[in-house]
Image (cartoon, rainbow, N blue to C red):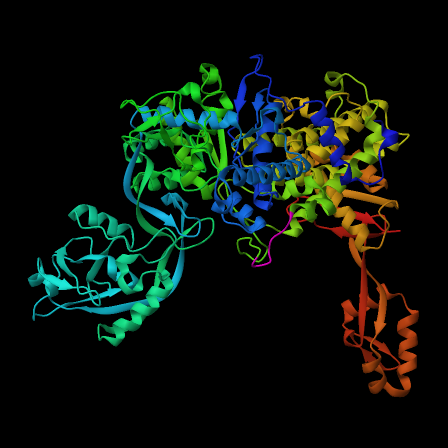
Amino acid sequence: MTVDDIPKDYDHKKESSWQKTWQNNQLHKFIGDGTRPSYIIDTPPPYPTGSIHIGHVLNWTFIDMIARFKRMKGFDVMFPQGWDCHGLPTEVKVEETHNIKKNDVPRDEFRQMCIDLTRDNIQMMKAQMQAMGFSQDWDREFVTMTPEYMYKTQISFLKMYKNNLIYQGIHPVNWCPRCETAIAFAEVDYKENQTHLNYLEFPSEDSEKGVMIATTRPELLSACVAVVVHPDDERYQSLEGKNVQVPIFGRNVKIITDTDVDPEFGTGAVMICTFGDKTDVSWVNRYDLDIIEAIDENGMMTSAAGKYAGLSLSECKLETTKDLEKEGFLIKKEKVEQNVGMCWRCKTPIEILVKKQWFVAVKELTEKVEEFADDMEWIPEHMKIRLLNWSGSMDWDWCISRQRIFATPIPVWYCKDCGKVNIASEEMLPIDPVQKQPDFQCECGCSEFIGEDDVLDTWMDSSISPLSIAGWPDPTYEKYFPADLRPQGHDIIRTWAFYTTLRCGALTGKKPFSQIVINGMVYGEDGHKMSKSRGNVISPEVVLEDYGADALRLWASNSVPGSDVPFAWKDVKYGYKFLRKFWNAFRFISMHISDFEGDPDQIKQKLNLMDSWILSRLNQLVADSTIAMEEYNFSQVVNKIQSFIWHDFCDEYIEAVKYRLYGDEVDIESKQAARYTLKTVVETSLKILSPITPHFTEEVYQHLGYDSSIHQSAWPEVQKDLINPEIEKYGSLGVEIIGELRRFKSASKIPLNAKLKSTTIYTSNTEVYDAVENMLMDIKGTINIDELNLESGKPDTQEIVVEIVTLMNKIGPEFKADAPKILGYLQSKDPQEIAENLKNDGEIIIEGHKITEEYMTMRKESVGKTGEKVEIIHPEKMDLVLEIVIR
């Protein structure tokens, strides 16, 4: 590519050609030969939904900028891409697509449907990621549904089981009736909902006074096993240990006391059900209460609900309320707000059921999790508290078994004779116990087994991602573990960050990564979280079509870790406009820098003040940008580089240097200094921009004649000898002077390329005088001034009256017939002479009439000491005056 090939306009449609070139040249491949320090990124494996959204763009742009920056800093970067395939989203989509439920077809057939859908979705998302210019090493792609990854998940299960960190037990679990599976607490979302607080009379078992309780869930009366009150509540102190009857069902339950009761809510008396919520579970365990299973796995009432058996929860609630009112147990109802736990995937309200499930012994590990969290660097730091708060709130162990199909099988069989749990050996993995029998006998001698048909929570797959990318369980994994960086969203701190820290810590005794950088969520332009129902979702493809990936990346990078980001079209358009501005500037100067050759050390000795000014600003930009990139403060980098390119370089320096490039009177050393400076600024700026706008910078870099990619170049080093605050101060003064003269031309309707006859700069400040003296040639050449002078002191100017404008609305009515004579006199005389007479005498006599200034207005002009008309400008915050001779 040469200067002659440079198109008039920047074409963002060429981005795809650079993406193909990078892939073909394996530009982003992790080598791992030890010749460079490694930098390992534990990247998020998204669910393969088939389409990346703006949130993905934000997250992966963050990661990609870090990866590209680290490569330029000399690191061998491992930037893998994974796909977290398993779990409910895929199964739900398959069920919707084929209009079936998971059990309508054989397990292997349903699983194959999920695999086929997932493979197609991965290919679509992979293409979209590549269209954004993300620089993953696709040779290190991992897919959690493959046998290779299943092996790692299953062996992690075995190791934790053998260390008593995974166990099977019968416990209350969160249950989604829609998905027909247990889910972990981290998978429960909460939504505000309005319902009724029902005040119910629980009669005493004898003739004494009963208890009124307030409940939002009358449908659970059949599972009521006790009533609880606060021990200090005077209303109920005499009732402790007595029995009351459950309305409708007539079953006696005991009144107990517990300090967890809030006496201010409702009546201060609460019914304990199995299970209405998490608090019910703790009370049932604490007081060893009976368990009545009134709800089944499909969210329907069981036989324990009596006449309500077979009804859905909502139907049972309606019928129970009617019966309570009919039989006189319902005293009153009032509206109340409540927090409803919902399945995070299908948004169905969850229930708590008692089920035999597999659990990770979280409570055995939380202390270590907190130690590891403290040993990581969190960016921003305050995000760590979210993980610590979640860890500290763990009352229940992590339920890891799911009653689904598309997931990693639990490598366990149950003996047909004695029921003993039999675990697969490492050599048998990966294995699906439903499809294959073990090659051993049970301790009891039986060789027939029932395979575990529950599968593992998808977080059991993704929570070992840093181990997997490092090559675990091969012992060489320690070379790349812990990972250097974990980038992720703040919405999955309590899931992915927590589970990864817990699992990797349990398996290795080490933290999983050294740094964790948290990105925010994307909001629509309306200020609300993007959602299809609100109609505020923006597809990345729409942006790419009109503006390209780099413009979208500029929007994404103009943010800081941890903060939510509103999508704004104006920001994308500004980024696009910036790239075109830079392109046009490069195209203009390309002929002057393409064949530049010269000794930088010699040329540096010949730099003029404006050269030194822009190079000082450039090197300060390098210093600031390097620190900001290390701190992941991408917004600061973007704002600084855009301001520098747009204003300092394009608007000021290039304009100031044009006369040196084209002028015949300029010596060769000055031209060489200008060409060197232009090329240095362009190349350095491109390198700073390259992690942010990889396509644009590659395109320009190749037009400069380089054979290698800009992404194989080194991050620019700060040339400290070129940073000079004093030079910047003086250079900025020159920029301000040029700006004032430009504004004068514009206001005076003088073309910017037209000559000014003469300009004199006056100042009494010797420091300013010396600085301006070094910039006279740049000011003169930039503004196109015939004669530019610099003098000490102040301008010697005076105001003269150049025109008398008579006020006919006063002269006519007052002087009537003499008015023409008065007008003729005023128009025939020298305006300055009339003004001086008025100043000296206060009046002039015309045709016997006294004429004063009230009958006219005077237009004045300033003249310099040569007598020529001048314009005087007093720039703000500059200790100087500009005197411009007007032709």
Q: Is residue 721 shown left or right of residue 418?
A: right
In the rendering, at what x and y percent does residue 102 appear? 49, 45
Residue shown at the point (84%, 33%) measured from the top left: 6
| Horizontal arrangement in the rendering, residue 118 relative to residue 665 (left or right) | left
| Image coords of residue 164 (percent x, y) | 29, 27
Front one among 403 and 267: 403
The answer to which of 396 and 10 lies nearer the viewer is: 396
7 lies above or below 96: above
Q: Is residue 413 left or right of residue 829?
A: left
| Main SS of residues in magenta | loop
**Which residue is found at the position 52% from the left and 46% from the top?**
521
Q: Nearer the viewer, residue 479 or 374?
A: 479
Q: Position of residue 88 (x, y in %)?
A: 48, 44
**Residue at 76% of width from left, 20% of height from top?**
603
For residue 531, which quarter of the picture?
A: bottom right
Q: Which residues are magenta?
A: 533-539
Task: Determine if residue 832 is in view.
Answer: yes
Q: Count the marks: how many?
A: 0
Camera sees residue 763:
no
Residue 536 in magenta stretch: yes
As drawn, 706 above or below 353 = above
Q: Quadrant of residue 685?
A: top right
Figure check: 56 above or below 441? below
